[in-house]
């Protein structure tokens, strides 16, 4: 295998420049390795590429999920004591279950949240794990009444979050690393907006609406949705 440090350096450059497909193509050459840092970057790159493609080519994005699940499963087996192992396993477990239909996705929720919480316990300074927990709660809160009835009928132990639970996690992520992920700020603004706390929503929405450099599809969506909400104020 080529020099590991050189591979990681090249991959990090691709990831920093949001060139996720290039990072995947590089790291896939070493997917059979048991080198944790290579596999962690591959899981991250697959996930970021999946998010980027989801808005423009959903089928192409979905085709990445089994690969991401295999890599994240390997990470968890290699190092279950590391936060990132649980983070990526939670991400791809939920995505893979979603491919199997609504019922399987619902049945996976407790396990997904358990791995997110384990990741948080192992590294409480990773802002993205706080985002994942907050986004998980926000998604539950967004469900229609009949959807919530089904979700909690199939997951009797699943947490029933309040808006404050989602906000606590999302705001904690910003406290740890401000501006790390514009979509995190979008969710904060959205929750405040939906709760009619417009004075609290406005600063987040204005910041997103004024973005000039958009590097990912998440950035573009955050800006677009912020502009729509601001137009209603």
Image (cartoon, rainbow, N blue to C red):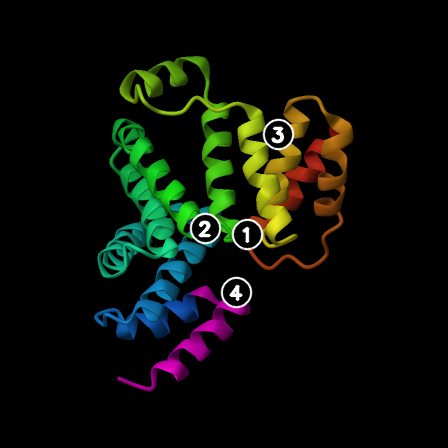
Secondary structure of the residue carrying tag 1 is helix
Foreground label between 4 and 3: 3
Up the image or down, 212 lies above or below 99; here it is below
Label 2: which residue? 51
What is the count of numbered marks? 4
- Disc 2 to disc 4, C-alpha distance: 12 Å
Check residue 217 in the rendering and tell me which mark sits there, or answer none: 1
Q: Position of residue 117 (x, y in %)?
A: 40, 41
- Disc 4 to disc 3, C-alpha distance: 28 Å
Q: Earlier in the sequence, mark 3 or mark 2?
A: 2
- Between residues 49 and 56, which one lies in front from this camera angle? 49
Residue at horizontal 60 percent and vertical 54 percent from the top: 180
Mark 1 in CB contact with mark 3 (< 8 angstroms): no
- Between residues 228 and 94, which one lies in front from this camera angle? 94
Secondary structure of the residue carrying tag 4 is loop
Q: Position of residue 40 (x, y in %)?
A: 36, 63
Mark 3 Cα within 10 Å, few/some/many (few <14, many 20+)?
many
- Disc 4 to disc 1, C-alpha distance: 11 Å
Q: Earlier in the sequence, mark 4 or mark 1?
A: 4
Label 4: which residue? 18
């Amino acid at each position: 295998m080529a020099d590991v440090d050189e591979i990681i350096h090249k991959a990090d450059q691709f990831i920093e420049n949001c060139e996720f497909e290039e990072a995947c193509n590089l790291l896939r050459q070493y997917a059979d390795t048991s080198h944790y840092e290579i596999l962690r970057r591959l899981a991250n790159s697959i996930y970021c590429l999946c998010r980027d493609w989801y808005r423009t080519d959903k089928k192409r994005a979905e085709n990445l999920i089994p690969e991401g699940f295999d890599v994240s499963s390997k990470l968890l087996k290699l190092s279950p004591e590391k936060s990132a192992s649980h983070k990526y396993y939670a991400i791809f477990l939920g995505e893979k279950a979603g491919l199997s239909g609504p019922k399987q996705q619902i049945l996976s929720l407790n396990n997904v949240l358990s791995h997110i919480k384990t990741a948080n316990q192992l590294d409480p300074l990773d802002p993205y794990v706080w985002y994942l927990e907050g986004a998980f709660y926000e998604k539950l809160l967004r469900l229609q009444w009949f959807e919530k009835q089904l979700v909690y009928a199939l997951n009797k132990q699943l947490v029933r979050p309040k808006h404050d639970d989602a906000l606590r996690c999302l705001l904690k992520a910003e406290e740890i690393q401000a501006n790390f992920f514009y979509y995190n700020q979008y969710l904060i603004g959205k929750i405040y907006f939906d709760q009619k706390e417009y004075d609290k929503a406005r600063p987040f929405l204005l910041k997103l609406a004024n973005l000039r450099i958009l590097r990912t599809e998440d950035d573009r969506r955050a800006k677009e949705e912020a502009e729509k909400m601001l137009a209603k104020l």
